Every structure is written in structure tokens, then in C-alpha cells.
Amino acid sequence: EDKVVQSPLSLVVHEGDTVTLNCSYEVTNFRSLLWYKQEKKAPTFLFMLTSSGIEKKSGRLSSILDKKELFSILNITATQTGDSAVYLCAVVYGGATNKLIFGTGTLLAVQP
Amino acid sequence: DTEVTQTPKHLVMGMTNKKSLKCEQHMGHRAMYWYKQKAKKPPELMFVYSYEKLSINESVPSRFSPECPNSSLLNLHLHALQPEDSALYLCASSPGPFREYEQYFGPGTRLTVT
């Protein structure tokens, strides 16, 4: 069964902390992995990763993919209260037609 | 224009009603998507349109009927829904080849079926 698992399910940190969110997957014919941030409404796109070992970076956020061990991490440094959200990982996979499944998400709460 | 818009924001309908959800983008994106999201769950992909043709239908019941009249518009026609269909319905678009899943989401339509 194809699946995407995120850990931890939830996390509470203080402003200034660094956090690492994990996403592991088991799918057939992996194509890409995506990270989204979802606050109260719709998810917002963060990163798309297709190659192992190449770090993607945007400000205080960075992500890397390990296609051998089948996981990705999302790092957030110097966290701020505005980083509080659900972070979703999604995997695109499949043969003739792409499929996409989301992980259950990690709920991050950053306290002042 | 760098956003995806969805109307209505909220919809309450009975099980015998027929209604439609509308999604629009003017970013020149060539792929559009419908997702269903229940509370505290991740989005579930329902349909994908690529270049205005339905490319993925994730075994969604026929009471949900998508339509893509042109490259900027995506509709979801609803008929004879069940209370368990109550959810947030998200539309997304993406640039197209090689960036299929770099998706930009609309704010969603909160649907309640009574």
C-alpha cells in the first residue's frame, strides 16, 4: 500500500528554536516530494524535491530529500510565532498517470 | 494576478439539491485540481485537469462531476450529495509540464450537506 508518514504529529517549541520535521514514504515509481504549509485556510506551496541530496532553501526554511532511505526533512531555524501551522508533505508517484498522496501533517505551535 | 479564487466561500445544501463550485485562475497555469479536505485530515485528491482534459479521476462518486470550460476555469457540479460529503473543497492550479505539482491553492469552499 502506498503511504506517506509524517512525524512528529505535533510539536510545541519556543520562538528561536530550530525544528526538524520528517516525512517518509513508500510508493511505487516515486516522482517528487512536496512540502506545504497550511494555516487556517488553503495550503501554500513551499518546496518541490525530485533529486537526492540537493538542499532547497527559502529564508529560514530548508528541505532535503533522501531517495535511498525514502524520506525528506523540513528544517525551520529561528522559529517565529508566524511559523505556527500544519506542515504537509505530499508525494507524487505513479506510472502512466501521476498520483499524489498527502501525509497526515505535523502541527507546529511556536510559543512566544 | 497571482491567486486562485473560489466561489462560494460557504455552501449549505440539502441532499436533493444541485449546486456548483467554481474555481478561477489567471496565472496561465495549465493544470487544475480538486481536493476534498475533512477536518484535521490532509487534502485528498479528487480530479486533475491537464490542458483542459481530465487526466486523473481518483475513483470519486458520480455525484461529483468536474468540468473545465477553459484553461482558467474549473467547476465541480454537485448532485444528490450525502452528509459525509461535508468538507472543505480546495481547488489548485499549477504551471504545467515539469512543475505539475507546484500547486497554488484557492481558499476553499466550506460545504455542508444537510
Image: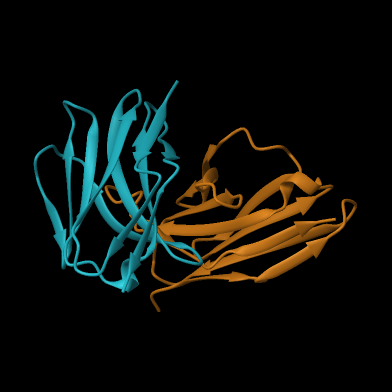
Chain colours: A cyan, B orange
The image position of residue B20, as x and y in percent, is 73, 61
- Judge whether B112 appears above or below A93 on screen: below
- Judge whether B49 appears above or below B6 on screen: above
The residue under the point 83% across, 57% down is B18
In which quadrant of the rendered view does residue A81 lie?
Answer: bottom left
Task: State which quarter of the image contains the N terminus of chain B.
Answer: bottom left
- Camera-side residue: B24 or B102? B102
The residue under the point 23% across, 40% down is A72
Task: State which quarter of the image contains the C terminus of chain B.
Answer: bottom right
- Camera-side residue: B62 or A65? A65
The residue positioned farthest toward the right in the image shown: B16
The residue positioned farthest toward the top in the image shown: A1
- Camera-side residue: B54 or A112? A112
The residue under the point 80% across, 48% down is B83
Q: How many marks?
A: 0
Taking the image as shown, residue B95 lies to the left or right of residue A52, namely right
